[in-house]
Image (cartoon, grey):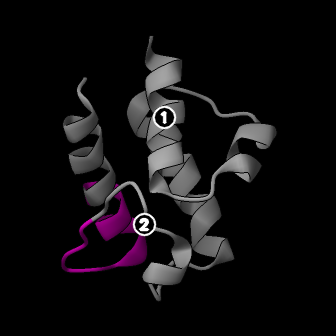
Amino acid sequence: MTREEIFKQLESIFKDVLDLETVTLCDSTTAADIEEWDSLNHVQLVYEVEQAMGIRFTSAEILSWKNVGQMVDSIIKHRQ
């Protein structure tokens, strides 16, 4: 799965979880950039990403993310 394909899948997950019509994610996107992305939705986003990608993140990984790009890096690491 390419980085671009991961972003497309994440955009679909973010739209569903955050109940948005459209969302465009990039490496530098943070929760501050998306009004609906609060701490409760963050937990649901992580869960849905894990389910969709068939992976499990550690708490340390999740806490280390500063943006969507770092989340994508973790997904790629798990899928290798």
The residue shown at (66%, 73%) is 40
Question: Which three-letter amino acid code belongs to the residue tagged 2?
Answer: Thr
Q: Which residues are magenta?
A: 12-24
The residue shown at (53%, 26%) is 55
The residue shown at (65%, 34%) is 57
Outermost residue toward the front in this view: 28
Which residue in the structure is indicated by mark 2?
A: 29
- Give x and y (percent) for residue 5: 20, 37
Question: In the picture shown, does residue 7 fall above or below 78?
Answer: below
Question: In the picture shown, does residue 43 fall above or below 10?
Answer: below
Per the model, the C-alpha gap separating discs 1 and 2 is: 14 Å
Q: Secondary structure at mark 2?
A: loop
- Give x and y (percent) for residue 79: 44, 17
**Numbered circle sitting on residue 73:** 1
Q: Secondary structure at mark 1?
A: helix
Question: Which three-letter amino acid code belongs to the residue tagged 1?
Answer: Asp
